[in-house]
Amino acid sequence: MPVESDEELRDVLGQETIAVVGCSATPGKDAHEIPKYMREHGYEVVPVNPYADEIFGREPYDSLTEVEEEIDVVDVFRPSEEVSGIVDQVLSRDDVDTVWLQLGIRDDEAGERVEESGRRFVQDHCLKVEHGRLMG
């Protein structure tokens, strides 16, 4: 079952490092503004976007498999049909605790694979909204 309870969501939001797959360099886009908000609230945000040269003053990684930092949460801003491939990359890592799919993004089968690996899975929730509601 995907994470739904406020207690579990608070626990996820207690993590420190968030890799944002699909992070945007374009101000005004949700995939830029939400990671920016999380940075402003003390989170380490690791941008993952093979098409951007710079996001938040740093070079983004092309994929999760290239990220050198330890990751606690993978936040996904990509279409639902890309989630399975992203989860494949998550499952190749030992450090990721939670996969979080942003509002409107769902993949129940990928979520089952995440949970079977002993990790947490959140789907169809906005990281910023939940942070503001539970931690603000």
Image (cartoon, rainbow, N blue to C red):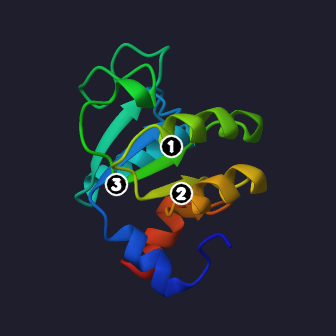
Looking at the image, residue 114 sits to the left or right of residue 42; the answer is: right
- Residue at the image position 52 percent from the left and 39 percent from the top: 31
Residue 72 got which mark? 3
Q: Is residue 41 above or below residue 53?
A: below
Which of pointers 1 and 2 lies earlier in the amino acid sequence? Answer: 1
**Amino acid on which disc 2 is placed:** Ser
Say whether disc 2 or disc 3 marks the residue closer to the N-terminus: 3
Determine which residue is flagged by label 2.
Answer: 117
Displayed quadrant of residue 111: bottom right
For marks 2 and 3, give the CA distance: 15 Å
The residue pinned by badge 1 equals 91
Q: Mark 1 and mark 2 in contact? Answer it, CB < 8 Å.
A: yes
Three-letter residue code for mark 1: Leu
Frontmost residue, 35 versus 92: 92
Q: Amino acid at mark 3?
A: Asp
Tell me which residue sits at (37%, 23%) in the image. 61
Secondary structure at badge 2 equals: loop
**How far across and down, in percent of the image, does residue 51 sit?**
50, 14
Q: Is residue 91 visible?
A: yes
Q: Is residue 63 above or below residue 97?
A: above
The secondary structure type at the circle numbered 3 is loop
Residue 4 picture location, percent across and down: 62, 78
